[in-house]
Amino acid sequence: MAVLTVNGVKREIDIDPSTPLLWAIREQLGLTGTKFGCGISQCGACTIRLNGNAIRSCVTPVAAADGQDIQTIEGLAADDGTRHRLQTAWIKHQVPQCGYCQSGQLMSAAALLESNPDPTDDDIDTAMDGNICRCGMYGRIKAAIKTAAKAGSDRATSDATDDATNEGGVR
Amino acid sequence: MNKWTRRAFITTGAVVGGGIIVGVAIRPGNRAGKLSPHVTTDGETLVHTWVKLDSNNIVTAIVPHAEMGQGVGTALTQMLADELDADWDLVKFEEAPAISEFANYPLAKGMLLGDVDIPDFVVPTVDGVFMRAAQALNLQVTGGSLSVRTTGAYGMRVAGAAIKEMLRTAAAEAWQVPVDQVIARDSQLSHKASGRAEPYAAFAEAAGQMTPPATPKLKTQDEFKIMGRHVERHDIPSKVDGTATFALDVRVPGMLYATVRRPPVFGGGIAKVDDTKTRAIKGVVDVVQLPPAKVEAVVGGFSSAESVAVVAEGYWPAKQGIDALDIEWTDTANDGVSSGSIFEQFDRDISAAVDREADVAEGDLEAAMASAAQVIKADYHVPYLAHTCMEPLNATAEVKDGRCEVWVGCQSPLGFRRAIAAALDFDIENVTLHNLFMGGGFGRKSRADYAIQAALLAEKVGRPVQLIWTREEDVRQDFYRPAVQSRFRAALDKAGNLTAWENTYVDKHEPVDAPLIPYMVAARDIGHVSSPTHIPFGAWRSVDHSQHGFFTESFIDEVAAAAGQDPYAYRAARLLHKPRQLAVLRRAAEAADWERPLGEDQGRGISLQESFGTIVAQVVEVTVVDGQPQVDRVVAAVDPGFAVSPDGLKAQIESGIVYGLTAALYGEITIEDGAVKQSNFNDYQALRMSAAPEIETHIINSDNAMGGAGEPGTPGIAPALANAIYDATGFRIRRLPLNLIDLQYQVDETDTQA
């Protein structure tokens, strides 16, 4: 038995706690946006966020996530369905081709922007190097991350202007 | 009501509720040379399209092509909407279901019309439409960069133009005005003088009673409104929020999971399986041995070996279970084969030239060699390659009551359906196949082996089963891009002119033109010998072009170097008879600023390759530090005839370049003891973001026949990179991948005779 909090929803599942989180998410919880690619943390298709950090769910046992905060691609948009600025940028730059790796790419990018709202090219390379895209859309992914970062800083600036007391919005 | 045009069979009918349906079937016609590998029997037609205009003014196109990331639906829809002069927002695209021949035409009818009760008097018309269109539908294959070139050019455009002509005629009759005064625009018909205007749907029923025009007039390039315009792809929003459904995401009630293992040596078998430890694992349901399956596909065929599968309550116990099996494989005649022995065999066979077959032989080669000022020779080698689609092979199947239902992502739904029916010994109409988004295809998903395994498993277990291959199985049980050796000899006169070109390589597949060069040369002899191995052959993005592009575009660079001339200028001087190719080469060189001086560790290389009807030139800039190449920039010029979806074409070229670059830098499947040595992305690497170059794509719309997009970017990157490394270091790359080569210790192997 394990208790997983995924996208803010607490779920109790009957599973061998050594099972990789990936399979608990896909098979027990029915959230199929997170993908299987290699099983040995080499490709990043299974990337999710654990307490905000990008991790490879194919090698992270359920036991390691028990009671902690898990976010999957299904939880990236706002509760009202408004797309995350990365998702908007992904569409603007027409990033996906086959699309299979993109959940993982987006989760790695979301973790990057949260810890580093204005990443350099090198920062982006470092954060994204664990995510393979066999369709080769790296140039578009990088451009979309920059667009999203800019949208984030624009929003932060306007939030700060609108409401000087809103510390959360200021970098 | 129907008509044959020069290339297509057009048929129309009325749909109850006031709609029109048009079917377009394409026959091989004058492109048979290129298309013939895809057509297996006489009278079989290649592709076909249905287009429906309903009473809500919505146009739905149903096309037999699968989406694997190439944006095919969007590009084809653009072609239809433009010829139809439809409102872009009122045109939809759906992938055709895997249904074949007239035996199943009622299924097609059901899919298009839903559960509508068709009045008796309409039935003959509608049935006639489906009967003829469905007879034409015999094959639905996505590959060969053919979707836009065939379905688009001869299906969608013809259908759109035919419907528009019939609608205009119907409106002209209803309004009692001359047809040439009826304007079709944005899904509306109008007549200026009388001020009449009505949506297309108002005339759909009347148009459905008409005989289609034999030669609907197609637009010229300057009349295009939607073709050539940037539109957003329809499939992308679902691919940024996790809702896109790939085969791996299919969930069937009561479903079990399985994974599988085949003998590591191709053609081997299972001697003994001890499953004691596996059966003790919690969640494991069964251990099942599956018989060999004969797999036929677009190119060639291979009898894939028997396999052993572990079926469980989840993938994880199945995976643990397969690892816990104690399997003894049978000995095979190929247990001693290695990459080394294969390349030795290639070398022997090329030298022996037994039964050498010429692709092209013209001019007096030996005389040119004898009178040459300089003869240069070189041998080139490339290794086997796996496809490694992001989505590991998987399929879900349910077999009950004599019927099989399969959910899969594949490049050949009908071929898969037939193969599954044959494996189960079912009639084809008792197999239903649902094709889902593919997480990559690249040629691998034209082979039905994995879907057959899933169907056999579901039959044996008596419950729905989702079979998921491990990545290790995916790497080790692929149908591989073949390893090839290619031997060259070229003659140059005193001025450095190329006077003779000789090339012998092993094992020809397709396309036939892959080893040909565009450059002017008086004497040439290009041919191949057969040198069979036990490694299963597969079509790999751009097929034979992926090897020959590297060989020929590297060796012409050697010729230019031997002549002491600039490699761009040398090529250009030999393309005066090919203005289209020359223009592409020139555009790439100019866009890359060919003459711009580079840093000390830097080099620049160029390549030119025509494949699948599209011409691509690439200029690569590379920096080599401590023997390590970093690709800084790739400038590509592309002439696809006309780019229907410019951003989609660019994305495909970027993708093809990165796919080819992965192969050039790291791609190698090695054979040891008869089996594949590599296993996963740790030892079969893929290019990652930090190594990815900036890619600029320049499009030339030359108004020639439309070419493909998915493959033409791939062949030219390896030679352009190898030529850039030569420019930077003086080291000539004649063997891939590059990470095996120490660029700091260079030996020039060029065999030059005075």
Image (tube, rainbow, N blue to C red):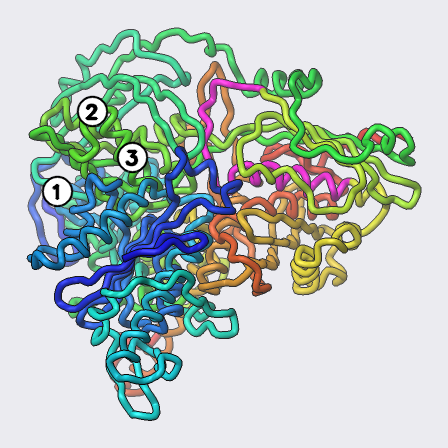
Q: Is residue B572 left or right of residue B74?
A: right
The local crowd at label 2, few if under 14, some if 14 to 19, many if 20 or more residues have their Cα within 10 Å, is some
- Coordinates of residue B705 in the picture (x, y in percent): 54, 57
Amino acid on which the number 2 mark rests in the picture? Leu
The subunit letter for the residue under badge 2 reads: B
Amino acid on which the number 3 mark rests in the picture? Phe
Quick one: B455 or A167, which is closer to the camera? B455
* SS type, badge 3: helix
Labels 1 and 2 positioned on one and the same chain? no
Which residue range is magenta in the image? B531-558
Tell me the residue that label 2 is attached to. Answer: B424
Tell me the residue that label 1 is attached to. Answer: A28
- In front: label 1 or label 2: 2
- Cα distance between the residues tagged 3 and 1: 30 Å
Quick one: B694 or B127, which is closer to the camera? B127
Q: Are marks 3 and 1 in contact (CB under 8 Å)?
A: no
Labels 2 and 3 positioned on one and the same chain? yes
The local crowd at label 1, few if under 14, some if 14 to 19, many if 20 or more residues have their Cα within 10 Å, is some
Tell me the residue that label 3 is attached to. Answer: B416
Q: Is residue B427 above or below residue B336?
A: below
